[in-house]
Image (cartoon, coloured by chain):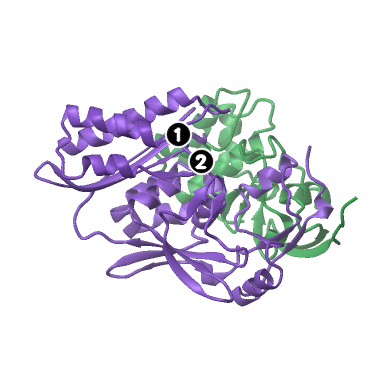
Chain colours: A purple, B green
Amino acid sequence: MRSYIPAYDLRVPGSLSEALGLLAREPGVWQPFAGGTDLMVLLEAGKLPHKKFLSVAKLDDLRGIEVTASDVTLGALTTYAEVQKHPVLQAEFPLLCAAARETGSVATQNRGTLGGNIVNASPAADSPPALLVYDAEIELISERSARWLPYHGFHSGYKKMQLASDELLRAIRLPRRAKPWRQYYRKVGTRKAQAISKVCFAGTALVENGVIRDLRIALGSVAPIVLRALETEDAMRGRIATPTVIAAAKETLAREIAPINDIRSTARYRLRVAQNLLEEFLSQLAK
Amino acid sequence: MSETVSRISIACRVNGEPRRVQAFPMARLLDVLREEMHLTGTKEGCGEGECGACAVLMDGAIVNSCLVPAIQAEGTDIRTIEGIARGEQLNAVQEAFLECGGAQCGICTPGMVIASVALLERHPHPTDAEIREGLAGNLCRCTGYQKIFSAVVRACELPNEKGLGSP
């Protein structure tokens, strides 16, 4: 049943300092949101508990894509549509563009934001695996401070994260890599368009003469959080992706992910698909 | 009964006209359009952003109006299905839907037309893949989609001055 609409209080702060002030004075009371593409679904389902919301969608300090020689910084309000259109992201961070293209429909991509995708903290979100394999960092701001931290480690458990109740996610920073890393992204859902992931896999690797010098692997929908497969990475670092090595890596991956049965898929299917995607990624590195 | 808030005044442009309505801040734009402005061409399908029946253009970009809280419509420029034709003159997309039989029961049609207009504004000569991607957010339970797809292809061949641009 739909929620009782008059019970929801919403505010649109005119400035970032006004928003941070409100969060500082009444911590935990105001829940920030941007495009509303998840929030409004919960509202319709009658599952939206908080009664006070802060629309940050118009705060310019949280907007824009800035490119320097060393990195690309995306405001938290960057939409999926904006990600797809950006030439530097297309050229150097194609996995993020692929994730943006495969998240919802065009209508959702026009409203949904990268920052929202992070703090909504769904383990099935599609942009976090890409952000993880690019070594993304995030900036959290409050009246007290502004701090940058690695995105890896931000999510600590299902819907749990290192975000204080007075903090806002301001930006996401992607370091530009000097060397050409190989890149791989694949989302598996019930159908090709507009389906929530059963498994989402992102991988990047620096390969020299067939040897994997360094790599990153991240998966969505196979654990309570979007996960870096650190043990699998360690098992492959410095190796050549031969069939035997790949077979061992698939066993390692099985030990570090924890897929479940739910409405969208089964644990068994997710494990098999995750392993197959790993094999597809690694096999391409051998070529 | 929990605490309630008052209606707020929201000003925006709808189909070129400045409008002001009183609505609860969390009211869905969909309901504001239909119930306060009596623009009932915008339909409710799923109410959760999956089906696209409630699609409108907001500042030129397609959005699902069931997922937009009224307070975020403040200051925006909205085009609904009622604003796609110019008076009696249909938009090329609408002409093509008629010509190709792109509608059956009609519930998805306003959203399909909006999605097609948005697509052709982004890609005036879309590839087959771009058409499929542009319509992926709109569900139809009647047509099997092929006639809708054909209508978009046909719309690209019709003269542009039938209104592909802004009103």
Estimate the x, y position of residue B129 in percent, counting from the top left.
Answer: 40, 36
Q: CA distance from mark 2 to mark 1?
A: 8 Å
Q: Position of residue A226 (x, y in %)?
A: 45, 44
Mark identifier at residue A131? none
- Chain containing mark 2: A
Amino acid type indicated by mark 2 = Pro
**Secondary structure of the residue carrying numbered label 2:** loop
Would residue A128 be found to the left or right of residue A262 on screen? left
Which residue sits at x=16%, y=45%?
A238
A42 sits left or right of A126 in the view: right
Label 1 sits on a secondary structure element that is loop
The part of the image, by quadrant, that contains residue A165 is bottom right
Image position, residue A272 (x, y; %) = 38, 25
Res. A258 mark: 1
Q: Residue at x 11, y 41 (%)?
A: A210
Identify residue for label 2: A224
Amino acid at the residue labelled 1:
Ala
> Is B51 placed left or right of A104 in the picture?
right
Asked if residue A205 can be seen in this view, the reply is yes
Instruction: Residue B11 in the image: state x and y as whole percent.
Output: 75, 65
| Mark 2 touches mark 1? (CB < 8 Å) | yes
B147 over A84 or under it: above or below: above
Where is A47 relative to A167, above or below? above
In the rendered image, the quadrant that contains the C terminus of chain B is bottom right
